[in-house]
Amino acid sequence: MLTISGEQLRAWRREQLRINPGSRAGLDWLLEMEGKVPWQTLQASWLYPEEPVTLAQPLQLLAGLWEEHINKQVPLQYLVGRCPWRDMELQVDETVLIPRQETELLVEIALDLAIKQGCCLEPWLDLGCGSGCIAVALARAWPQSQGWAIDISAQSLNLAQANARAHGVEQAINWLQGNWLEPLLGQPSNWQLLISNPPYIPSGVVDNLEPLVLNNEPRLALDGGIDGLDAIRSICSMAPHVLAPGGWLLIEHHHNQANDVARLLQAAGLIDLDAAMDLEGKLRFAIARAPGGS
């Protein structure tokens, strides 16, 4: 632990941004996540510069992380090994996609559907679970539900299980390794909810992403093929074979794929098609239901 004045912290912050120019918000995020200096404390230092501020890590260590982030273009989330998401803190590393804020809305759509139906949507299944963010969020929201999570990567599954364990829901989720819905084919069609944030960025677009993303985050979790729809096409075609009558399919997709995804859902025989917007007002989420049910 280190205690310095608010003015000393602000001076250190100015020096870091001078030596390694970058996002002020990013440096403040690092101070909060690794230094344990809340944003409110940092803001208060402007009004009360002589008040003491306690840091959980030495400034030298924080400066080293900031330098690596700027000069080597490594995401801060990977450097600290954690990422805040919804009301949780999740472990992350280079084997999984860093959970995005817009994916929080995918969980909200599922929770809203459950409220409208008057019960949780179980059994539920998170396809391509990655860090486990969606699965853990659903298991925490529906603690008595039966949940399943599938990922093709054993490393991702290990990390997702660690996150579930950290939040006390590991035993509430069944874990399967495999390619999308293939591990479930031949089993009874009783899933009330299939939810997925699959890779959906067209390959050519992935190649032009900023180095921070392209050189660090797993391409497997980003690249959706030539048109970005490879994984979504597979999920849509198999969903009717595993969904219970009236079961729901929720998918996150690229900002310009809403019409294409709707056509895939319709071609698969799903009904009650709907779409929802992301935080920027772009159609980002597809919603559909299997025929039958009440």
Image (cartoon, rainbow, N blue to C red):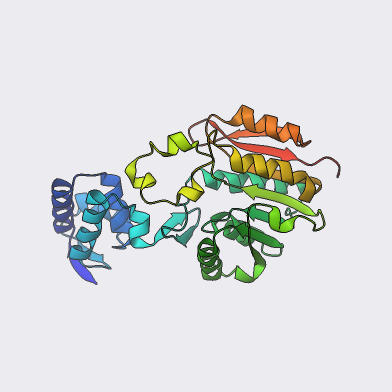
Residue 68 in the figure: left or right of residue 94? left
Q: Is residue 206 left or right of residue 75?
A: right
Q: Is residue 139 above or below residue 196?
A: below
User: Horizontally, is 2 left or right of 228 in the view?
Assistant: left
* Quarter placement of the C terminus: top right
Q: Which image quadrant is residue 30 in? A: bottom left
- Left or right of residue 182, residue 41 in this image: left
Q: Residue at x 53, y 39 (%)?
A: 225
| Residue 140 in the image, given as x and y percentages of width and height | 61, 61
Q: Is residue 56 above or below residue 101?
A: below
Mark yes or no: residue 111 visible. Answer: no
Closest to the observer: 121 or 125? 125
Q: How many marks?
A: 0
User: Residue at (41%, 51%) from the top-left corner?
Assistant: 217
Front residue of 12 and 20: 20
Give the residue displayed 78% in from the left and 44% down from the top.
240
**Residue 30 is at least partly visible in this image:** yes
Coordinates of residue 166 in the picture (x, y in percent): 51, 69
Q: Nearer the viewer, residue 113 or 41?
A: 113
Q: Which corner quadrant holds the N terminus?
A: bottom left
Q: Quadrant of residue 264?
A: top right
Decide: is 108 above or below 57: above
Q: Residue at x 60, y 43 (%)?
A: 231
- Residue nearest the observer in this picture, 27 or 128: 128
In the rendering, at what x and y percent does residue 144 appear?
71, 65
- Residue at the front extreme, as displayed: 226
Query: How far from the left and from the top, in percent, is residue 18?
Result: 14, 46
